Every structure is written in C-alpha cells, then in structure tokens.
Amino acid sequence: MSLSAQFLDELRARTLLSALVGKTVKLTKAGREFKGCCPFHNENTPSFYVNDDKAFYHCFGCSAHGDAIRWMTDQRGLPFMDAVKELAQAAGMELPAMDPRAAQKAEAAKGLYEAMDDAAVWFTEQLMGIAGGEARSVLEKRGIKAETAQAFGMGFSPDSRGKLKAQLKGYGDSLLVEAGLLIKVDEKEPYDRFRGRLMIPIRDPRGRVIAFGGRVIGDGEPKYLNSPDTPLFDKGRTLYNLDRAAAASRKTNRIIVVEGYMDVIALAQAGFGEAVAPLGTALTEAQLERLWRLSDVPILCFDGDSAGQKAALRAAHRALPMLAPGRSLAFATLPPGQDPDDLVRAKGPAAFEAVLAETQPLVERLWASELAAGPLGTPEERAGLKQRLNELAQTIADPSVKHEYLSDFRRRFDAHFAPPPRVWNAPRPANTQKGGKWRPAPPAGGDHPQAQGVKASGIDPVLAKAVLAGLIRHPAEIARHVEVLGSLRFAGGALGRLFEAVVDVAIEDQALDSERLRTILANSGFDQMATDLLRADATPYSFTQKMAAPGRASADLGEAISILVARPEVDGALADATAALAMRFSEEAFERQVALVKEQQALEARLANLCQANEDARTLDTEGS
C-alpha cells in the first residue's frame, strides 16, 4: 500500500489532536492551546502543550514533539501502518486501494480477528460460569483479583475436544485451524487445541486478540501451551502485554521484560504496568527492536534460577550486534529460585522496586559471566578469558560502542589481575652519626615500634563486625571468599570465636542459609551476639540489611572484605615508610610515604562509598513507600 503525502495531510487535518491526546492525558484550556502533564516523562507542573490549529503537541520539559500519527506510534507504541489505519477509521477515511492479493489477505485476516475475539469472549464466559470454578480457585490461590483477571481478559477452556468448535462453527473448521484454535491431524476431524486450561489472550499492539496462552489446570504437560504461528501471530515478533505496557512505560520511563504471562499479570496488579514477556522463546532481535522503541535501556528481570539466568545471558549475547550509542540492556537479579510473581506476592511491590533499583549494566553482566566461565589460574586460561571478551566486543556493529567495550573489558581485566600492592620494607641502614651522637638503625624488616603498633592493632573492629554480620546474613558468600577469610585474624575473645564458628559451619555445609546458621550458632551459645550484629541500625552497609537485593549485597560484601584485608597492610606499610623517612630523608622515601597515604585515603573513600550507596538506597526506599 502506498500512502501519499496528501492522504496523510488530510488524515491529520481530520483528527482533532486535543481529543486524541485527551483520551489518556488530562488537558486544560490555556488560551488557544491545551496543556497538561507530559506523558513522556514524570512531572508535577504541566509543560506539555497541544495545539489543534497547528496539529502538533510539544513538551517544553523533555522536547517530545509530534502530530497525531507520531502520538500513536510513540505514546501508544503502534507500528506506523497500524497507527494510520486506526486514525483513518476514526476519521471515516478509506485507505488507498490495495492490490488484489493484499486485499484478499486483509479480508481473510478480518475473519481471523473476529474468530479470535469471539473465542476470547467465550473463554471468559466459561471462567465466570459453573465450569470455571476450578480455574477461579487457581487464580485465587495465586492472588489474582477478579478485576485483574477481567482487565487481562482471562478465561477458561473446558476439558473437551469439541465445545469451542461447536461454539464457533459458523466460521468453518478450516478458518479455525488457520487461527490455531483447532488442531487437524492427517484426515481426522479437527478438535479443540486448548482443553482444561486457564486461558490468557495475547494481543497485538492495537489490542486485538491474535493468539492465546493456556495454563494447565492441575497436573499435566505441557504446563503452558501457546497458539502456533498463524497469519496473525508470529511469536518471535510479539511481546505479551505490549498493548498495555507501551503507555505505562512512557510514564515510568522504563520497560521491564519478565519470563511469563503470570509474572506480567502479577506485576501489573502490584502497580508495575510496564512489564512485558516473550512467548516461550528466547528474546529475539525483532522483540529487542520493539523494546528499544519504548526505552533506550530495557530492564530484563528473568527468574532467579539457573534457566532464567541463562536466558538473560542469551539475550545479552543476542543484543550485542544491535547496540548503539545510548542503547543497551540492564539486568535485574531476583533472589535465587524466585520469579517476579513469587516476590511481589511474598514481600510486596517495595521488594520488587528494590530489585529494579539494583540493575546491572550489560557490560557488567557479560564480564561477570565470562569471569565465572572457568578457572583462571594459568596464563593460558587468562589469555582465553581475554580472547572471549575480545570476541564478544567484536560482534558489536557500531564502531564507537565496540571501541568502548574493548576499552572497558581491557580495564576490567587489568584491574582484576593486577598484582597486589607491594608492602614496602625499608632497608636496614648502617648506624649513622649525627651531631656527634650515634642514631640506631630501625629493626630489620622495617619493624619500627610505630609500625609494630599498627600491625598489632590488626583489622578495623567496626568493619570486622559488619563483615561478620554480612557473612551470617549471607553464608553462601563464605565459600566465595574462604581463602581470604582464612588469612584474617579477627580480634580475640568472643568476636574471634564467633568468626571461627561461622566460617567452620558454613564450610561444612555450603548449602546453609542464614536461618539455619543462626540456629546452629544459638545452640553454640552465640545467639545474643549474632542478634546484636544483625540489628538493622548496627552497621550502615547493604549486606547487613535484611531487605537488600542479593546482587547488591554480594558485591558490597566482597568489596568490604577486600578493604578489610587491605587496610592493615597499607597501614603497616605506611607506618614503615614514615619511620624510615624519620630516620633518613630521601626523595624515594618521601614519594613512597605519599603514595601510601593516597592508598590509605582511597581505601577510606571506598568504605565511605559503601555507606553512602546504602544510604541512598534507603532514601529511595523511603521516598517510594
């Protein structure tokens, strides 16, 4: 179909833009224009204006600008031709004539759309009737409210091979088979595809039913059954709930991708209307392109199990060739074994919002995945890691983004495998005479009394308590840091004994969770001490807080352990350097002292950042609650 400029101009002229925009945005008259709060970004003071005379809208806050067609594509998320068709229908305009084959195809599609819509209505009636009692119980157990089920058009297909076929017999078996509603095997009579299932309609961006997903009631396989690909439905190009999520994403400035329908529905009920899901396949290039039309950085929040994380990584690899400046992906990590539906039902919207607040950039996800892919103890293994990272970056088509990824991977590699800072020991100088008096040389190895005092003080007790609390809260982290933890010398007394008990118990049972660990500690007489360490106000770090996102807590705990180990070494080396400088001044000794002071300050800054980041997260939680 060819659309002339004259046709499009006439279409714009016949569309009252304020009426179109006013369907979803509250507008008030402002002189010859209308104004309201912009739907493309969050604002409290209206800066969005609609001008019917000039037939355009404009936001002075975010510079969103366009006409009626642009409104339908940007705010509604419709493809261009669908936007034109919908506006033309509302304006009473006939689209330019199509070629005969296209017209025949469109007429056939019209019958398919009508059949799918009638099927959706019938499924909904069954859910509300006597036969749908068990299906309604399933919804109730999953916490899905009746109004939510109604909003998503959920229904029920009776466990029968012919009830839907009989209901829609007027369309003919061949059309119902083409629509994916019936199954035909060889020369046998066609029969209902969906039987004994909770039915979920799948819609196109215009809100038309194009397919169904069916969840089995009770036991049975497959658990979920989708419509096959049809003239209306291409599962690799369709995202569930895109018709509803497009408008919601404009307000929240984000789009969330989860794994399944029930996750989308549960999130929408919890207030996250901007969630979509692929349909039983890995995320495709076509689906990524649709997502990027709504957000520069879609958030992938797949299940916390191994399969979900592998699916997220596949999406990361598939997105790489398509990256562009400002266009990427982010990853939200759920607690192990949980999906979004589980999380919002168990802990409410705030818990899911906290997960979204701790997203991981695409580059970080790729780096972490390759780093964990195998051993890195030999030069050859490290060279393999470097090669894999280089090959990933080379798949990026955009040259500027490719260059940045190569640079970022190189910096991460160099920083990760950099040798530990050398602990400087001052050489033992000969005894020197100054002013007629002999000055004794410092003890061998630089163990000046000042340095000995620093080393005797050991690790920072406040930070040590925080790390210990984090290990009790997250015992799975002990196995990751066991070698470093084994080198630590905690303060003596009860705190030292508690540390040794925690590490010993966690090493013996690496599947231990926090509650079981605390029970074992309580039986060993450490209950009160562990309770004091885990008080919400005891320490200002994410890994000691009960509601912290697991990914964030793990990263922060690793950083805290690194600081805990490094500080005594740096402090001791600085004391050695200061003592050596006092005994004999030299440019080399002075520079060494200055360098160690900077290392000490850098460690303090890293520790302060851990506190500040956690405080910022708490502030966001408070403001969002």
Image: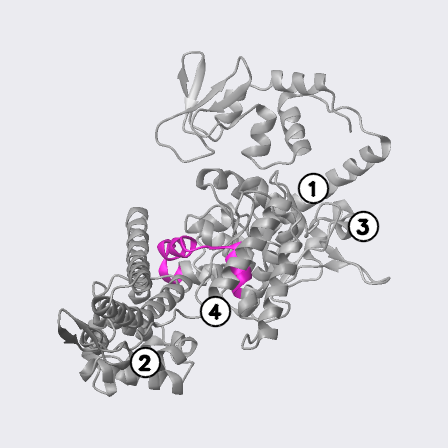
Q: Is residue 367 magenta?
A: yes
The answer to whether the residues at label 3 and label 1 have Cβ atoms under 8 Å apart is no
Secondary-structure class at tag 1: helix
Residue at 53 percent across and 12 percent down: it is 53
- The disc, 3 or 2, on the residue closer to the chain's N-terminal end is 3
Location of residue 325 in the rendering, given as x and y in whole percent from the top left corner: 57, 42
Q: Between label 4 and label 3, give the one nearer the viewer.
A: 4
Circle 3 residue: 174
Circle 1 residue: 113
| Magenta-tinted stretch | 345-368
Circle 2 residue: 517
The answer to whether the residues at label 4 and label 1 have Cβ atoms under 8 Å apart is no
Secondary-structure class at tag 3: helix
- 1, 415: nearer the viewer: 415
Q: Between label 3 and label 1, give the one nearer the viewer.
A: 1
- 131, 561: nearer the viewer: 561
514 w.r.t. 56: above or below = below
* Distance Cα–Cα, label 3 vs label 1: 14 Å
Q: Between label 3 and label 2, give the one nearer the viewer.
A: 2
* Distance Cα–Cα, label 3 vs label 2: 62 Å
Disc assigned to residue 354? none
Disc assigned to residue 337? 4
Location of residue 51 in the rendering, given as x and y in whole percent from the top left corner: 50, 17
- The disc, 4 or 2, on the residue closer to the chain's N-terminal end is 4
- 305, 483: nearer the viewer: 483
- The disc, 4 or 3, on the residue closer to the chain's N-terminal end is 3
Q: Between label 4 and label 1, give the one nearer the viewer.
A: 4
Secondary-structure class at tag 4: loop
